[in-house]
Amino acid sequence: MQENEIEFIVQKVMEELQRKFPAETKTEQIAKTNEDGLIFTENDWKTSIPAAVYQEGVSDLIASTPARIGVWRTGTRPLTKTMLKLQFDHAAAIDAVGGEVLEKTLAEFDLFTVETCYENKETYLKRPDKGRMLTDNAVRTIKDKCTHHPQVQIVVSDGLSASAVETNLKDVYPALLDSLKINNLSAGTPFFVKGGRVACMDHIGEILEPQVLVLLIGERPGLVSASSMSAYMCYRPRKGVVESDRNVISNIHPLGTPPVEAGAHIGTVLKKMLEQKVSGVKLEL
Amino acid sequence: MKTKITLLNKTYEFNSLKEILAKANEEKSGDQLAGIAANDAQERLAARHLLADLTLSDIRNNPVLPPEEDEVSRVIEESINEKIYQSIANWTVSDLRENLLAESTANQEISRIRRGLTSEMVAAAAKIMSNLDLIQAASKIEVVTQCNYPVGHKGTLAGRAQPNHPTDSIQGIRASLYEALSYGIGDAVIGINPVIDSAESVKQILQMTKEEIDRFQIPTQNCVLAHVTTQMRAIKNGAPSDLLFQSLAGTEAGNTAFGISVGLLDEANDLIQKEGTATGPNLWYFETGQGSELSSDAHHGIDQVTLEARCYGLAKKYKPFIVNTVVGFIGPEYLYNSKQVIRAGLEDHFMGKLQGIPMGVDVCYTNHMKADQNDMENLAVLLGSAGVNFLIGVPMADDCMLNYQSTSFHDIASVRRVLGLRPAPFFEKWLEKMGIMENGILTKRAGDPTLFI
């Protein structure tokens, strides 16, 4: 990683931290002023083992893994809170798959929208092949609106998690633009693909013939994070590209690969692709 | 072989056994994705009527994938007992179904019949059976196997402790293992899916689990579910492994995509016989699941139920200790919703058991599938009734490494309690010794992982 890149990341992370935690005590204040309502925080889902043989050991075990252990039981069933927590995390994942990216989020970054042949959510899930092809309409729109043969083509897609775009785009995208600038790379006209699969990169590559393409796309939601994003990158994406020709930065979300860090790193990877004229497993990073 | 049927006034014609088998299936998104599913509900029933009337010899004489072209077909073909096959060759698929379900047909007779069946015949029967048919027929079959200790007895339900960790932390894996044991789970196997597929890492996990087994004298067996070649390297480097694990596909090309072949499995089999740490005689753990052949474009236009049956035909060659289908892991393009997952779980369990496989099921789903935990609880109870050998136990059903949801320690304990099932016999005695279980019921101490610190 280059020095300017590190400085840039540090600065962005600091900004993000200040935005997220403006005052440590803020949540407590809210809790105090809302006595008639139920305020639920992470701590309220915690349960305890009433008469553990080695009480001090419980927290050590729990701390050693993100798995849901030390939860206790009633009869053979989990306690109510433990069950509600699991259902709540699953609910977030369900909403992420079924959700839509808000128009205003896309407008904020001047992204116009085109669609793949996915038809609807059900077909999207059943027919991955349809999410790899853009509609005829989309092809015309892109041809009209976009710079052809750009050095870098940026594409954003909801994929399997609309909330991944909602959560991360505001941090990833500006950091990505800055990192292109730092690396002296020029981007074409960015846009949003609704109902996209990773390999829609190849179809877009055929249409616009960019030198490199980066696709920011929502990942399959897990229970740890329903808002995880991946950045797929490819040198000269065209039909017939195989999985191992692409590079990916995955697990981009606030608790995983920090979005700002990911955005900043993309420019570096793209630059190497352009220098080495290759991507995927053959690219030396 | 008949390929045409007139159902009331409408005539349906099919090109091949392969097409009849595919179109007779219950609706599955995977068959639709492959473009081989019935066009509508009535065509599905037309195919099913025709299939019910085909004889077992029709099925054997019209191979969906000829033995000359595929080594899985060869393994299945070579396993047939010709005398027993001849005694049932004229049965229709309907006869097979009705024989399996007849009151007079018990485990003993099914054990005889199985030696004359190919995997395709077994799949054909499953296609004309309802969910309760699948449950009842399977519940007659007892398949007991032994690695260090036996599992699979009637009236028992074992659990695999699956204490995975997102970075293979030994401490973290151990913590989830303690939790599992404290709920009475771990009799089938202590089996970890590693993140890092290296011999050294696999060895470390095997050593830790072996130490815990020795320290508490737990009547079970250990396994790390890395690629078989990685496990072989680990074992050659001295790793203490009771079982070898591998995922199987129902075609040679599917297995090539998994990086295995019959030759490699034979070689691995020799190694575990010579250098494994278990008593035996059953030293393999296999996983399967509908859809894997299509996902690697290795399906040859054959439907996913038939291909799944062929996985068990291949598994049988290695006399496995345990096998489970990972029924909802692959995603909605193969099994779209809970109805399809439940159906597939029951089909797989039945098709495995009928072929003499010690079947367990990983009752599971991913978050982009139309299913939730209630559906998994339903299927777990159905499988418990069907006599499933084991289920998968994950802390609160949420696997923090593989990012999918399965069944929990609580769930397995609950299915045992509701259906009056017991852990594997030696393991139950051990639970009693540890003060975790009494008369098949968890004691006050159960659920406390610090028992093992």
Image (spheres, helix red, strand yellow):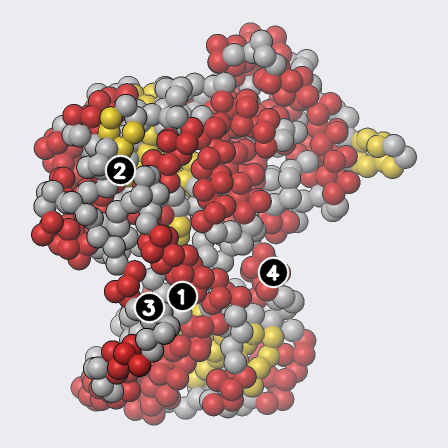
The amino acid marked with disc number 3 is Phe
Rendering coords of residue B313 (x, y %): 48, 27
Please name the residue shown 26% across and 58% down the image: A46
Q: Secondary structure at mark 3?
A: loop
Q: Residues within 10 Å of mark 2 (few under 14, many from 20)?
A: many
Mark 4 or 1, nearer chain start: 4
Same chain under badges 3 and 4? The reply is yes
Reading the image, the residue beneath label 2 is B183
Q: Secondary structure at mark 1?
A: loop
Q: Chain of mark 4?
A: A
- Image quadrant in which you'd find residue B407: top left
Left or right: residue A96 versus residue A7 is: right
Please name the residue shown 11% across and 42% down the image: A53
Rendering coords of residue A231 (x, y %): 39, 73
Mark-to-mark CA distance, 2 and 3 = 29 Å
Same chain under badges 4 and 2? The reply is no
Give the label, 2 or 1, closer to the camera. Answer: 2
- In the foreground, A182 or B38: B38
Reading the image, the residue beneath label 3 is A40
Q: Secondary structure at mark 4?
A: helix
Reading the image, the residue beneath label 1 is A226
